[in-house]
Amino acid sequence: MLIKETDPIENDEITDRAHYLRRREFIGAATLTGPSLLWGSRLTAAAALLGGCRGEDTLSAFGAGEDTQAASGGGENAGARKAPSSREMLTGVVPGPPELGSDEAPTSYADATRYNNFYEFGTDKEDPARYAGDFRTRPWSVAIEGEVAKPGSVPLESLLAPHTLEERVYRLRCVEAWSMVIPWVGIPLGKVLERFEPTTKARYVVFETLYDPQQMPGQRRRTLEWPYREGLRMDEAMHPLAILAVGMYGEVLPNQNGAPLRLVVPWKYGFKSIKSIVRIRLTNEEPATTWNQSAPGEYGFYANVNPAVSHPRWSQKRERRIGTLRKRPTLPFNGYAEQVAGLYAGMDLRRKY
Ligand SMILES: Nc1nc2c(c(=O)[nH]1)N[C@H]1C(S)=C(S)[C@@H](COP(=O)(O)O)O[C@H]1N2
Ligand SMILES: [Mo]
């Protein structure tokens, strides 16, 4: 990865965290009012409670109502809704299982949305926030193909419709030795894959980011082989910690964080958590993945966070938590060893890095 040492960007952590915590209380309260707040529901207490946020936007995040296209006026641009405002709220979010979350203080919203890796929009940390603003995330479909009994191209709304959105507060550890704590909103990846009925030959799953150099200026240069691809072994993909995220901090994902749909695999280095996914393919063979192809000696297919295996150009023993000063020890599997170490029983993680 192209490493550039940047100072943590100026930090409005305190105000921002207060803002976030207030919303968290709200999510908790909303949950108690029951199933009327679940995904796709109509105007609810949740929407009504959202100060400073127009109800219509809240409700129609992802075109949740089936009639969104009609409502937006039909014609040639039917469905081509404008990109979400950066602070579009999600409704019907429930807290994820406590044993899968972290109670660490989330990174400030400002840092999590201005210090990004999304090479499709440039290689500087500030590039995604700078250049992804007009990226069109609707309409959006995801192709599900390969070793599944029920392949298809699925509009994002239908992909999400049967699921309850959960909040999962996870550590995110980049292979560049920095980390954040991010409250994601998403759905378990395994539950989504099950709906397409993986065949007995399905042993891996590979994800692909949109290829659209017109919209993604970084793709006009060969920094990486486009489109960005990442993959998991099937048992990793089915693990309850792995989610497809559509939001963070209670809100629709900002474009720079991988809108409208990204993977989050918290026990692996951040580059596995592929953004703006348009294709999911189940395969029998281990798939080629972008960073592994570009530098196989530096980035493995597994990429489990591991303080004992140095990157050839730097140590992974410690990490810099964005927004804090002192470095901290890196934890095996990014602190999720108890949940996931069993997936790798009998594997030599120094060789399968
Ligand atoms: N398509 C795509 N996905 C991507 C990347 C990228 O460049 N392109 N960068 C990865 C890396 S290296 C990290 S650390 C995380 C960063 O996610 P964040 O910007 O939301 O913190 O996204 C990952 N997903
Ligand atoms: Mo990363």
Image (spheres, rainbow, N blue to C red):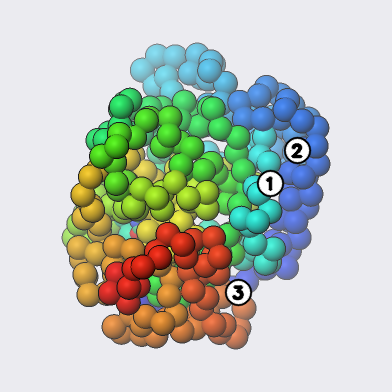
Residue at horizontal 34 percent and vertical 68 percent from the top = 347
Residue at left 62%, top 30%?
39
Q: Earlier in the sequence, mark 1 or mark 3?
A: 1
Question: Is 232 in front, or is 269?
Answer: 232
Q: Answer yes or no: do the residues labelled 1 and 2 have beta carbons within 8 Å?
A: yes
Residue 31's disc is 2
Q: What SS does tag 3 mark?
A: loop
Q: Position of residue 197 (x, y in %)?
A: 37, 30
Marker disc for residue 80: none
CA gap, disc 1 to disc 2?
8 Å
How busy is the neighbourhood of tag 1: few (under 14 within 10 Å), some, or many (20 plus)?
Answer: some
Of the numbered discs 2 and 3, the one sitting upstream in the chain is 2
> Is ligand 1 less than 8 Å from the beta carbon at label 2?
no
Residues at badges 2 and 3 in contact (C-beta under 8 Å)?
no
Q: Position of residue 119 (x, y in %)?
A: 33, 60
Which residue does the numbered mark 1 point to in the structure image?
Answer: 95
Q: Is residue 114 left or right of residue 56?
A: left
Q: Which quadrant would residue 138 be assigned to in this image?
A: top left
> Above or below — where is 201 with respect to 69?
below
SS for callout 1: strand
Which residue occupies the foreground of this view, 309 or 312?
Answer: 309
The residue wearing badge 3 is: 323
Q: Amino acid at mark 3?
A: Gly
Please report the residue visible at 54 percent of the width from the left and 60 percent of the height from the top: 339
Circle 1: residue type: Pro
Give the CA distance from mark 2 to mark 3.
30 Å
Q: Residue 25: where, in percent of width, then height? A: 79, 49
